[in-house]
Image (cartoon, helix red, strand yellow):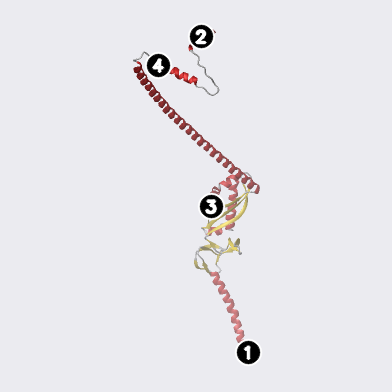
Amino acid sequence: TTNMDGGNFVSQGGLAILLVFVPLYIIFWIFFFKTVKIVRHAEVMVVERFGKYRKTLRAGLHFLVPIADSPRKINWRYLNCVGRNNLPVVKNVVTDRVDMREHVINFGKQHVITKDTVEIQIDALVYFQVVDPKLAVYRIQNLPDAVELLTQATLRNIIASMTLDDTFSSRERINDTLLMQVKGDAERWGVSIRRVEVMEIIPPNDIRAAMESQITAERERRATVLTADGERESSIVRSRGDAAKLILTAEGDKTSNIQRAKGEAEAKLTIADAEASALQVLRRSLEASAVKATAYLVGVQYLNALQAMTYRSSGSTVHLIPQKTVDVIGKATS
């Protein structure tokens, strides 16, 4: 009996110790996790004491006063790739850390209306970074949603003041204007907007078909203009070549005619000199006789003419009549 009573006492004492130390152990670890905070690099923690801002904890090991100090929780969201295809998924979390790195928000395609009442879809990105965690926590309830909605509203206002053609041709101007307008509003939340980029502008299907037709017509017009310009330049060059050819031909003909005329003149001078020399020789030869040189030359010319007259072709006949007979016939007819 004594042994049984002793065993019951030991078991009851162990149970009592277990009931005391286990809650103390749990309470210890609860206090430890509540009071000891490790803040990682590029993160900060906003600490409140009895609901009032106390300080901002940077990277390192920190100790909080139990019950009095508590980190302020904020709503945050980020993109996370899940699945085998690594599809981006937006996750919303409640955390007590403020990430000081640069963040990117892709708020997807949104419908906007241009100045000429054309509804288009625009996909844009915004890059921002928290520079003042105190303002980011206390000035705005949900910082990522606020930045997204501010960018969307500002982008709608910018597109509403532009036509469809200006929207497609002025993407850089849209980015610069959007960044300038959004940056000033986001600074009061302790946020710096680093970059805003319009990724894609999607018009309706009918507008897209009309734009493609317009682009095709414009390309055909440019091709026609270039072809016409080429033909015009070719005609100009060809006409210049023909003109140059004519000029060179005329210059060649002129030079040839000049040389031919000079040759003929020299030939005539040479013939005249030869005839003059022949006449002088003939005159010297006929001085001893009573025949004059002129009569001799006339006789020679008469014989040459007579030879030309006696030349006949096949089927023709030449008759020689004395001069006296011709004179008698002339007198009889008169």
Quadrant position of residue 98: bottom right
Q: Are marks 3 and 4 in contact (CB under 8 Å)?
A: no
N-terminal of the pair, mark 4 or mark 1, is: 1
In the displayed structure, would residue 237 be above or below residue 83? above
N-terminal of the pair, mark 3 or mark 4, is: 3
Of 134 and 208, the residue lying toward us: 208
Quadrant position of residue 290: top left
Q: Which residue is mark 3?
A: 183
N-terminal of the pair, mark 1 or mark 2, is: 1
User: Where does the image place residue 155, in percent across and percent down from the top left?
Assistant: 58, 50
Secondary element at image label 1? helix
Q: Are marks 2 and 4 in contact (CB under 8 Å)?
A: no
Point out which mark residue 5 bears: 1
Residue at the limit of the structure toward the right, as seen here: 206
Q: CA distance from mark 4 to mark 1?
A: 194 Å
Residue at 56% from the left image edge and 46% from the top image edge: 169
Of 165 and 215, the residue lying toward us: 215
Camera-near label (3 vs 2) is 2
User: Where does the image place residue 64, in percent across and percent down from the top left?
Assistant: 52, 68
